[in-house]
Image (cartoon, rainbow, N blue to C red):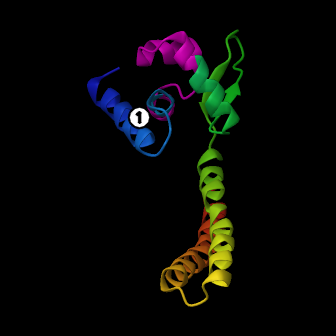
Amino acid sequence: MNKDLLAFIEKVGIFGAQNGTPRSVSRVIGYLLICEPAAQSAKQIQEGLHLSAGAVSNALSLLKRAGMIRPVSIGGTRSLLYEIDPKSWKNTIEQRLKIVPNALEVVQTGLTLAPSNKRLMTMRRVYEAFEQESVRLIQRLDEIE
């Protein structure tokens, strides 16, 4: 794999780590985003990223549970291959947007205790605006598929 592709994979790894995903798991995502062919065996991922078999196995298990990847079987091969699930991006965004109603509930609880609290009112306005926009965003994401 050339150094530009490896740099991209590292960039994905750093981005993921900055957002709470273990770097090795994010590197597997980066690899599966850019590798050819798109479906790869655990062994190919391990060799491509120079990770241990255990690290790749753990990453694949986590990514399967998260719905980011899907196993695929290709005729003529005995090993299970993995690829990015195209629905995973929309699903990830939808999961993250689910915190908005929870945040609004928390804010409302605070406002019942302190009805004129400007910080809570600002927080509520931000989350209400975000909630309105998130509905439109999900509709737009439905159009992408």
Q: Nearer the viewer, residue 46 or 101?
A: 101
Q: Nearer the viewer, residue 51 or 69?
A: 51
Q: Residue furthest bottom?
A: 116
Q: Residue furthest left?
A: 3
Instruction: Say which residue appears at 64% left-offset and 66% top-offset.
Output: 138
Instruction: Say which residue appears at 65% left-offset and 70% top-offset.
Output: 106
Please provide percent x and percent y for residue 47. 45, 12
Say above or below: 142 vs 41.
Answer: below
Which quadrant of the figure contains the N terminus? top left
Label 1 SS: helix
Please provide percent x and percent y for residue 111. 63, 82
**Tally of numbered tags:** 1
Please provide percent x and percent y for residue 89. 59, 49
Please provide percent x and percent y for residue 144. 60, 59
Asked if residue 75 lies in the magenta stretch, the reply is no
Say above or below: 127 vs 144.
Answer: below
Q: Which residues are magenta?
A: 28-56
- Locate residue 124 relative to residue 70 in the image: left or right: left
Say above or below: 87 vs 72.
Answer: below
Q: Name the residue tied to disc 1.
A: 13
Which quadrant of the figure contains the C terminus? bottom right
- Locate residue 51 relative to residue 144 in the image: left or right: left
Amino acid tagged 1: Gly
Q: Residue furthest front?
A: 113
Asked if residue 30 lies in the magenta stretch, the reply is yes
- Locate residue 142 relative to residue 2 in the image: left or right: right
**Magenta-colored segment: predominant secondary structure:** helix
Instruction: Say which residue appears at 43% left-offset and 17% top-offset.
Output: 48
